[in-house]
Amino acid sequence: MIRSSAFAFLGIIVINVLVIYSFLYMPFMFSTFYPSFLPGPIYDFNPIKYAESFPVSTNYSSLTSGNLQPLFIYNISGKPILGQIIDILKLNASQVTPEAYWRVANLAGFFSNYTITKNYSVYFLNPYYYDNISEQPNVTEIYLNISDVYASPFYTSYPPSDKVNTSFSFITTDSFSIQSYASWNFTNIEWHFGGNISQNESYYYYTATFNLNKYIVVNNSHYYYDGSLSTRITVKPWGVSPNIISGYVVYNQSLSIPLILHLSANSVKHQIGNYSYVLTPSYPPKVNPEFYGYIFYNYLVYLSLKVNVYNGSSPITFILLNGSKVYATEERYFNFTLDLKETSISPKTFNISLYTYDSIKVGSYYVDRYWSPGYIIICPQIYIIYNGNLKLFKLNFFIQNHMIETPPDWVFNHEAFSEIYGNNYANMYLQQVGYDYGLNKLLSEIVKNFTTDEKYEKYLSWELLLLSSEISMQINYSNPAQNYTMALLSKEGSEYQAFMQMVYIVSWSLWYTTFNGSYYFLGKWIPWTYGLFTGFSIPSFYNKTAILPYIILNSSNASYLFFNIESFRVTSWWYENSSPGNGSIHMDHFNVYSYVPKEGDVLVLHKYYNFSNIVYIPTSSTEFIVMENISNGPDGI
């Protein structure tokens, strides 16, 4: 906004009341050009629209800090404050303190709890044309109706939270057994001569089909067929091949229980004659079965919850088992016990959680608030006891407690609700940011909309300043109003309140400063306060530096407007960069104003105006050194 130049000089133009009304309010009186347009539009100004879209960043550290800090920080690249307020109101009790939450809720009243009165003030604005040729801005007059809007805090409860105590136990209720079992027979028996074993000894053997029928036995009494198995075997006098037949029975499509059958045969010796012998195997083969059994146990698992619910607006608490709701209540204090069935044959992990929920309406927005203190996982672990072919499957239980048993300390120890709501943050924000930032935005939109030629865009900020000054000039001087906003709405207030309307409106776009001085009138010095603005370009049509005094500031190529704050109807200064010829304009008409900045003085100009400790608006500053002061007024001025 401030541009450096080697030939940067700053001129002061002193304009008395006669020049203001003849030169500024009739900018074309010296021209043969008289633009003629239809009357301009009527704008109804409502600050809520602009207050809602005010760009901020959330100061997240303030949400959990015990110290009073701004909740939001003005950031031209930030997000609209309305959405960020709603986001904060959705936070749970572990994410925001009661003090911060209620301050934000209080502030939320500006868009949720407001009244638009029937009263409004009408301001007539006369845009200044940029030269005596164009029709820019292409409107001659604008009517601005400023609504009187009053906001009250939005009252609400702090979000709900729970204190949860838990206890756990389990018992064994019963057991059941599963065994493998089989029946068998032999079919398709065929005998064969095996040959000679020695000169006087030979043998015979047979083959057969071994048919096995498998069964599952439940609790030693219920038999369930589970298929068959057929195997061709060879039985010789010295053994059976194969001699082991094994398999499984399957219970419930998942549990396999083995069974093993051992086959054997005896050798039978037959004498033939005096010296010959024949060996044969015994029939049928001997079968020695080996069955296996499993014993499983059933359990009842108890998880008892004792829950205290704090705060919230008619909150509902839900208890969930593995993600499914099993209980809901609106009670603030309750006990609930989960009875869970468990078995060692197929143990399950249980996930028990709870959350408390409520909903509030903020204006037209519904805000759901949740407190989820965590969850408990019941983890069964199988251990096996071996007893021969019998396995006993039992369970141990391990508890993973991820439950926050107690909310943060600030839920119970905090500043009183009534103390926080003793301030009307909603109305303070609306009347400060809503009106001043809103008027800055609206006036900027108006100027931009009616300046259609891009070559004049550099004068938009200058036009904004002048339209803002017209608002100030239409406020009637009287006793001080209750505050600056009331002066704007009633169009009555002190001279200082009138002038500061312009400062508050343009401070979002331009640099400003104020300082004390005097005005020489009827033989005496009268104290005044002066205001200085920069950050714009003045159209050359208005730059009449040849007849006015000036000062020179360092490193500046910007234009300035100098106002007498407490009587700016009487006198104003234009400050304009100028470098005619040798860079000087020699005038000697500075004889009635003090303090005029002197050579070597430092002028500090500011941008933005911080209104509140809820919404912090960082102010910027820049320094200028007075390099030269050319005037011949009294007292060395």
Image: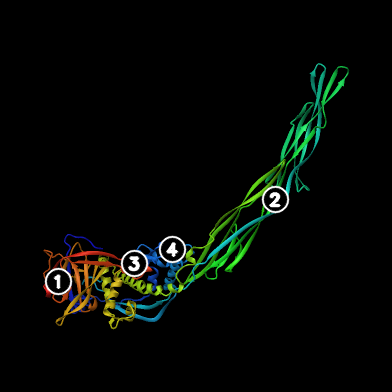
Q: Nearer the viewer, mark 1 or mark 2?
A: 2
Mark 2 highlights which residue?
Answer: 297
Q: Secondary structure at mark 4?
A: helix
Q: Are marks 4 and 3 in contact (CB under 8 Å)?
A: no
Q: Residues within 10 Å of mark 4 (few under 14, many from 20)?
A: some
Q: Secondary structure at mark 3?
A: loop
Mark 4 highlights which residue?
Answer: 64
Where does the N terminus fall, quadrant-wise? bottom left
Amino acid at dot 4 = Thr
Q: Is residue 125 visible?
A: no
Q: Earlier in the sequence, mark 1 or mark 2?
A: 2
Pick the front one: 334 or 562: 334
Mark 3 highlights which residue?
Answer: 617
Instruction: Measure how far apart labels 1 and 3 are at the Cα level.
Output: 36 Å
Q: Are marks 2 and 4 in contact (CB under 8 Å)?
A: no
Amino acid at dot 1 = Pro
Q: Nearer the viewer, mark 4 or mark 1?
A: 4
